[in-house]
Amino acid sequence: MLGYGIYFARSINNTLLKARFGGAIICAQVRMENVLEVTKNELHNVSNSKQWWNTYDTVYYNHESPNKDEFCINDPEQVLC
């Protein structure tokens, strides 16, 4: 939804139903410096793309429902622990 990258949410409960085919859940600290915030009406600007990588290291989807917010980073080095 936010393009290519590594996805994160604010909590485990908010993450469980997001993955298409299941997978692992990790708890991590993530460095986010240049963040592009998008809303539902702006998703088409980043969906299925990595074009935002040229300017931003993170896309933050500010969902209408706060428990559905998500983040996508472009570099594994942003995962601190």
Image (cartoon, rainbow, N blue to C red):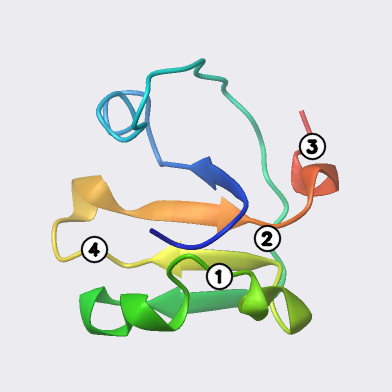
Structural distance between the alpha carbons of marks 3 and 1: 24 Å
Task: Give x and y (percent) for residue 32.
Answer: 68, 60
Residue that mark 2 sits on: 32
Residue at 85% in and 45% down: 77
Q: Which amino acid does label 1 sit on?
A: Ser
Q: What residue type is labelled 4?
A: His
Structural distance between the alpha carbons of marks 4 and 2: 18 Å
CB contact under 8 Å: marks 4 and 3? no
* Among the two numbered marks 3 and 1 on one chain, the one whose residue lies closer to the N terminus: 1
**Left or right, residue 59 beside residue 33:** left
Q: Residues within 10 Å of mark 2 (few under 14, many from 20)?
A: some
The dot on residue 80 is 3
Residue situated in front as seen by the camera: 4 or 57: 4
Under tag 2, what secondary structure? loop
Asked if 31 appears above or below 43 in the picture, the reply is above
The dot on residue 63 is 4
Residue furthest to the right in view is: 77
